Image (cartoon, grey):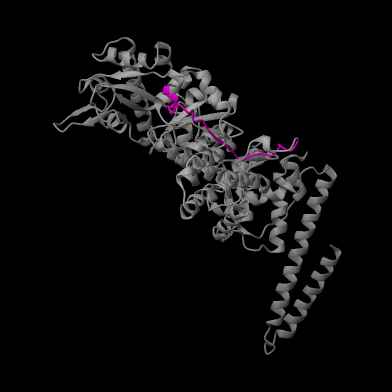
Amino acid sequence: MSGTWDELIQQIKERLDIVDVVSEQVVLKKRGSSYWGLCPFHKDKNPSFCVTPSMGIYKCFSCGEAGDAIKFIMKTKNLEFKEVIIDLAEKFGLEVPQSHKNGASTRELKEQMSKATEFAAQYYHDLLLRNKSDNAQMALDYLSKRGIGTDIIKKFHLGVAPKTFDTLYNELRKDFSNDVLEKAGLILKSEKGGYIDRFRARLIIPIQNENGEFVAFGARALESGQTPKYINSSDSLIYNKSKLLYGLYTAKEAIKSEDSVILMEGYFDVISSQAHGIENCVASCGTSLTSDHVKLLSRYTKSRRIYLSFDTDSAGQKATARGASVIKEVFAGLGNIKQFDESYMPTGSNTERYACEIRVIAPPEGKDPDEFVRSVGADAYKMYMENAPLFIDFQLENILKEKDKYKTPQQKAQYISTIIPVLAEIKNKIIRSEYTEMVAQTLGINVSALESELKSFEKANIPKVERIVKNVTKNNSVLEKAQKNLLSVFLVPDNHFSFAEINEMIGEITFDNEILIIVKTTIDKLIYTVNNVKELIEHLYTEFVDNPEAQAILPELVEHAQAYSGLSDEDFKNIIKEMITKINQCKHVEEVKTIKEQYKGIDNNDPEALKIQIQLRDRIKKKRQKLEMN
């Protein structure tokens, strides 16, 4: 239980993992001790966004955006600090102090919606399992034909909605308001007045998020002539179909262990496949694949091996191409997408790491995964999966199947124009040459002519280089840089001195920049309450939540601190002494410069001019002597 607001913030920070937080929005690739990805705050073409877990911070080295996990959530979700803390408290099951509960109505509404949806899921499920509804047997018969028995019904919490108009509503209204039920998508306003159930006379497929919480429903028609075949919940405060994948909750452990995921189209594709031992499969919920879906999956498979297993008809092939395009766009800039099998590589050279790997499972029988698994078997499906071609091979194979349709030179030229963009995607020149030769032989055309067309295509499609205006700080003065360097010694993670000892070494040095004064004053306040550098950084970000200028300096200080990592105790002390000397020298230079300006500005007609000039000249002399001593 959290006692105070500050204690709540600290408990939340202890539970936050910045890599997990950022991974919800950015696909990250580990390099050394840091993670890199495409910056979400500007149009990034090459990974310039760095996450440093040991410090709990992120920074973009192109646009300059930087911060900690909480600031990242604030920026990407456009929320205020208090809103983020209250949302995270809900996520972690922490109690918000009474004094900060005002404005938490959205959170309370979401809690009520979640409870109502869970109640509905259990209610529909009980009606089916206990055969309590007038159409329960019809639903059980339908599922039996699909090879789905009691165990699978229980695993996926399948249910049935009665034919009556308000059976569920009459149960839910006892504990929930009409507003909650309507916003959860469980009831609709009737044309005759009052409310009716949204789902009626349908097989109910509850949708769970990755944490297992019930958030929405898919509902399939049971009666002949009933349209549409499927009805899906609309987006709500607890459900966003563009960011949720059906079956992920039950598939995520298999995705991790097999380091791969199969993307399917429908609910029953996933249900049948998981029921027959193909457990690492998921599907979108009545929408096309989105970049958020892909980012979500990337958190569960390190290799990012993604199989596309859609229908093999024309619409399915278009969905496959569209899905592959989304995947490639998400991983662009993080390295090469695998475009050739290892058999093409010489022995010992297949160690290249890929941003992702896209393969297509397309059994020749022309059945969707659900029908294929039920009729041909899971083992046969797994065999096709083991031999699934890379997307580029799948593309070329489908295009080359059509070669005999094109007879005239004009038709062939038009036909080849559909192949060129596919070949142009192959970055490895040796592999591209192999593919180009294979295509030329298959089509019976001159390979040089094909290569010439390929070069022309590339020349015409050279991507425009976007000019990125870097959000960098103004050139710091030498004095300001020296002061920042001195402040950064508090943030060196592996030194053997306590914060109090470092403060004593720094002594009475004064800072000129107003922001640096604030940072130093705050550090002085915190060093007796934190135990390590990471805690200090976390507390500083919290302290400066309403001071973006001070927050913006923290990543810069952390970056400077890295230069002093690994020093011996003696070297660490000497570095601090050198910085202090540098600061004093800079200040002396600035003072001498100021005095000279004053000296030049004296009015010679002033009776006191000579006296003032002598005084200033003496001050300059003393400053020079002091500077030489240092």
Vertical order, 414 against 96 (above or below) = below
Does residue 210 appear in this view?
no
Residue shown at the point (80%, 51%) measured from the top left? 575
For the residue pair 580 and 63, the one nearer the viewer reads as 63
Where is residue 264 drawn, in percent x and y? 45, 30
Seen as rendered, the residue at the extreme top is: 130
| Residue 476 sits in quarter | bottom right
Residue shown at the point (73%, 69%) measured from the top left? 591
Does residue 143 appear in this view?
yes
Residue shown at the point (30%, 33%) measured from the top left? 183
Asked if the stretch drawn in magenta spans residue 476, the answer is no
Where is residue 156 drawn, in percent x and y? 41, 19
Q: Is residue 93 left or right of residue 220?
A: right
| Residue 517 sits in quarter | bottom right
Vertical order, 130 against 495 (above or below) = above
Seen as rendered, the residue at the extreme left is: 192
Q: Is residue 486 left or right of residue 336?
A: right
Residue shown at the point (69%, 54%) measured from the top left? 484
Where is residue 61 drawn, in percent x and y? 62, 52
Q: Which residues are magenta?
A: 348-371
Asked if the stretch drawn in magenta spans residue 361, the answer is yes
Q: Is residue 578 left or right of residue 361?
A: right
